[in-house]
Protein backbone atom coordinates (compact mmCIF):
# COMPACT_ATOMS: atom_id res chain seq x y z
CA UNK A 1 0.00 0.00 0.00
CA UNK A 2 1.18 3.52 -0.72
CA UNK A 3 1.76 6.41 1.65
CA UNK A 4 -1.45 7.08 3.58
CA UNK A 5 -2.78 10.58 3.17
CA UNK A 6 -5.98 12.60 3.36
CA UNK A 7 -7.38 15.04 0.80
CA UNK A 8 -9.39 17.68 2.65
CA UNK A 9 -11.06 21.07 2.67
CA UNK A 10 -10.41 23.68 5.35
CA UNK A 11 -12.90 24.15 8.19
CA UNK A 12 -12.93 26.62 11.08
CA UNK A 13 -11.71 23.77 13.33
CA UNK A 14 -9.02 22.53 10.91
CA UNK A 15 -10.01 20.21 8.05
CA UNK A 16 -12.37 17.44 6.90
CA UNK A 17 -11.64 15.01 4.13
CA UNK A 18 -11.24 11.50 2.79
CA UNK A 19 -8.42 8.99 2.71
CA UNK A 20 -6.12 9.02 -0.29
CA UNK A 21 -4.06 5.84 -0.59
CA UNK A 22 -1.89 5.74 -3.68
CA UNK A 23 0.52 7.48 -3.56
CA UNK A 24 0.13 10.03 -0.78
CA UNK A 25 3.76 11.20 -0.72
CA UNK A 26 4.13 14.88 -1.68
CA UNK A 27 6.39 14.07 -4.63
CA UNK A 28 3.38 12.41 -6.29
CA UNK A 29 0.27 13.72 -4.54
CA UNK A 30 0.90 17.44 -5.12
CA UNK A 31 1.15 16.89 -8.89
CA UNK A 32 -1.86 14.56 -8.95
CA UNK A 33 -4.07 16.92 -6.94
CA UNK A 34 -2.98 20.02 -8.88
CA UNK A 35 -3.65 18.14 -12.11
CA UNK A 36 -7.10 17.13 -10.91
CA UNK A 37 -8.04 20.69 -9.92
CA UNK A 38 -6.53 22.42 -12.95
CA UNK A 39 -7.08 19.88 -15.73
CA UNK A 40 -10.09 17.77 -14.73
CA UNK A 41 -12.07 20.42 -12.81
CA UNK A 42 -10.79 23.33 -14.95
CA UNK A 43 -9.52 25.28 -11.94
CA UNK A 44 -12.70 24.98 -9.87
CA UNK A 45 -11.32 24.10 -6.42
CA UNK A 46 -14.75 23.75 -4.81
CA UNK A 47 -15.91 21.37 -7.56
CA UNK A 48 -12.76 19.33 -6.98
CA UNK A 49 -13.49 19.20 -3.25
CA UNK A 50 -17.08 18.08 -3.91
CA UNK A 51 -15.91 15.20 -6.11
CA UNK A 52 -13.01 14.11 -3.90
CA UNK A 53 -14.74 14.55 -0.52
CA UNK A 54 -18.54 14.68 -0.87
CA UNK A 55 -19.28 12.42 -3.85
CA UNK A 56 -17.01 9.52 -2.84
CA UNK A 57 -17.40 8.87 0.90
CA UNK A 58 -15.11 5.82 0.93
CA UNK A 59 -12.01 7.74 -0.10
CA UNK A 60 -9.63 7.20 -3.01
CA UNK A 61 -7.10 4.74 -4.33
CA UNK A 62 -6.35 6.75 -7.50
CA UNK A 63 -7.57 10.31 -8.08
CA UNK A 64 -9.02 10.95 -11.57
CA UNK A 65 -6.85 12.56 -14.22
CA UNK A 66 -7.63 13.57 -17.82
CA UNK A 67 -6.91 10.03 -19.07
CA UNK A 68 -8.24 7.95 -16.16
CA UNK A 69 -11.49 8.19 -14.18
CA UNK A 70 -9.79 7.26 -10.93
CA UNK A 71 -10.72 4.53 -8.45
CA UNK A 72 -12.58 5.20 -5.24
CA UNK A 73 -13.12 2.84 -2.33
CA UNK A 74 -16.89 3.33 -2.34
CA UNK A 75 -17.68 2.58 -6.00
CA UNK A 76 -14.77 0.93 -7.81
CA UNK A 77 -12.44 -0.97 -5.53
CA UNK A 78 -13.07 -3.77 -3.07
CA UNK A 79 -12.46 -2.74 0.52
CA UNK A 80 -9.15 -3.84 2.01
CA UNK A 81 -10.33 -4.71 5.51
CA UNK A 82 -14.10 -4.77 5.40
CA UNK A 83 -16.35 -1.97 4.17
CA UNK A 84 -14.77 1.40 3.48
CA UNK A 85 -15.45 3.95 6.19
CA UNK A 86 -17.78 6.75 5.22
CA UNK A 87 -16.85 8.89 8.21
CA UNK A 88 -15.20 12.18 7.31
CA UNK A 89 -11.58 12.31 8.38
CA UNK A 90 -10.75 15.26 10.64
CA UNK A 91 -7.62 16.50 12.34
CA UNK A 92 -8.59 14.35 15.33
CA UNK A 93 -9.22 11.14 13.34
CA UNK A 94 -6.39 11.35 10.80
CA UNK A 95 -3.88 9.63 13.08
CA UNK A 96 -2.89 7.00 10.49
CA UNK A 97 -2.20 9.57 7.76
CA UNK A 98 1.33 10.69 7.02
CA UNK A 99 0.18 13.74 5.05
CA UNK A 100 -2.95 15.86 4.68
CA UNK A 101 -3.56 17.90 1.53
CA UNK A 102 -5.95 20.80 2.15
CA UNK A 103 -7.65 22.32 -0.89
CA UNK A 104 -7.76 26.06 -0.14
CA UNK A 105 -9.26 28.38 -2.78
CA UNK A 106 -5.87 29.85 -3.75
CA UNK A 107 -3.43 27.06 -2.88
CA UNK A 108 -2.82 23.46 -1.89
CA UNK A 109 -1.47 23.15 1.66
CA UNK A 110 0.51 20.12 2.84
CA UNK A 111 0.25 19.17 6.52
CA UNK A 112 2.28 16.64 8.53
CA UNK A 113 1.79 15.36 12.08
CA UNK A 114 3.66 17.40 14.64
CA UNK A 115 3.45 18.67 18.17
CA UNK A 116 -0.15 18.62 19.31
CA UNK A 117 -1.69 18.30 15.87
CA UNK A 118 -0.91 19.06 12.25
CA UNK A 119 1.76 21.45 10.98
CA UNK A 120 2.06 23.05 7.56
CA UNK A 121 5.11 21.73 5.77
CA UNK A 122 4.53 23.45 2.45
CA UNK A 123 2.04 24.89 0.02
CA UNK A 124 1.76 25.57 -3.67
CA UNK A 125 -0.55 27.97 -5.48
CA UNK A 126 -3.02 26.55 -7.97
CA UNK A 127 -1.96 29.13 -10.53
CA UNK A 128 1.47 30.63 -10.99
CA UNK A 129 1.85 34.40 -11.37
Image (spheres, rainbow, N blue to C red):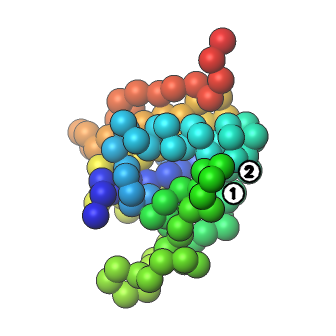
Please tell me in which quadrant of the rendered image residue 36 appears.
Answer: top right
- Mark 2 surroundings: few (<14), some (14-19) or many (≥20) residues within 10 A: some
For the residue labelled by badge 1, is the local secondary structure a helix, a strand or a loop? helix
103 on left or right of 84: right
Reply above or below: 29 against 91: above
Q: Position of residue 123 (x, y in %)?
A: 47, 27
Quadrant in the picture for the C terminus: top right
Nearer-the-camera pick, 13 or 110 = 110
Relative to 5, does residue 81 appear above or below in the rendering? below
**Residues at marks 1 and 2 touching, judged by CB atoms closer than 8 Å:** yes
- Residue that carries the numbered disc 1 in the rendered image: 50
The residue labelled by disc 2 is 47
Q: Residue at x 30, y 57 (%)?
A: 2
Residue 127 seen in the current view: yes
Please tell me whether residue 63 is drawn above or below residue 12 in the rendered image: below
Could you tell me which residue is drawn at 74 percent across and 50 percent down? 47
| Residue 103 seen in the current view | no
Amino acid sequence: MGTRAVVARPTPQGFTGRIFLNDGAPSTAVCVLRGFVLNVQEGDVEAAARVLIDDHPGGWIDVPDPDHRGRCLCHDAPPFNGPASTELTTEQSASEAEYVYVLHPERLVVLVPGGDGWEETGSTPWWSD
